[in-house]
Amino acid sequence: MNNCIFCKIINKEIPADIIYEDDQALAFLDIRPVSRGHALVVPKKHSDDFLSSEDQVLEDLMPKIKKIAAAVMKATNAEGINISTNHGAAAGQVVFHLHFHLIPRFGGDRLTAWPHQEIEPKTRAEIAEAIKRNL
Ligand code: AMP
Ligand code: ZN
């Protein structure tokens, strides 16, 4: 039995404020929005998260994310928008069906940015090398 809440929305088993639908993708408003117009874009084909998704699914989704993000911005008069996916519980993922957040941003909205840190160039170079070795 599939207990995925986003699959249930896709299958119309539970309601959502759907803003876009085609054969491969669905977009709907987040039930607990970070800002006005916060939307989620999901592929209809279930995958748990970003890194386990097929390249083709991601390729199909990205232009739709762009189109929907533009509409969300226009509809809300947003000045900016954060487009992101949380991969893994440590990154804040709660629903394990791939989804991209579209979070409209407004000047002075006081949504806190991630803190930046200083880093030694040597440490930065080591991290860069480690990442390159894993590509
Ligand atoms: P994440 O933390 O990246 O997994 O995000 C999951 C998002 O799904 C959260 O922002 C929730 O508010 C949202 N969410 C959970 N259940 C629903 C639902 N039934 N309809 C719309 N959004 C939902
Ligand atoms: Zn699902």
Image (cartoon, rainbow, N blue to C red):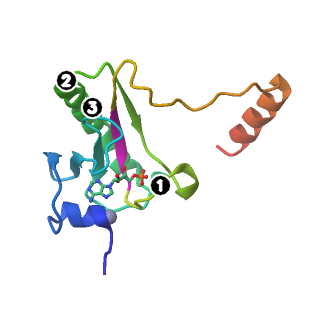
Say which amino acid is labelled 3: Ala
Label 2 CB-ligand 1 distance < 8 A:
no
Q: Residue 71, image x and y in percent?
A: 19, 29
| Position of residue 107 in the picture relative to residue 92 (left or right) | left
From the top left corner, tell me how far across and down residue 84 is, in percent: 42, 39
**Quadrant of the image where one finds ligand 1:** bottom left
Q: Nearer the viewer, mark 1 or mark 3?
A: 1
Identified at 22% across, 34% down, the residue is 68
84 sits left or right of 71 in the view: right
Reading the image, the residue beneath label 1 is 93
Circles 1 and 2 in contact, beta carbons < 8 Å: no
Give coordinates of residue 50: x percent, y percent.
Answer: 45, 51
Q: CA distance from mark 2 to mark 3?
A: 9 Å
Estimate the spatial distance between the alpha carbons at disc 1 and disc 3, rounded to whole Å.
21 Å
Residue type pointed to by label 2:
Lys
Quarter containing the N terminus: bottom left
Q: Earlier in the sequence, mark 1 or mark 2?
A: 2
Q: Main secondary structure of the magenta part?
A: strand
Mark 2 — residue?
74
Q: Quadrant of residue 11?
A: bottom left
N-term mark: 1 or 3 = 3
Which picture quadrant has residue 114? top right
Residue 69 image label: 3
Considering only vertical position in the picture, is 47 above or below 73? below
Residue at (19%, 23%) from the top-left corner? 74
Q: The magenta stretch spans which residues?
A: 98-103
Mark 1 C-beta closer than 8 Å to ligand 1: yes
Name the disc covering residue 52, or none.
none
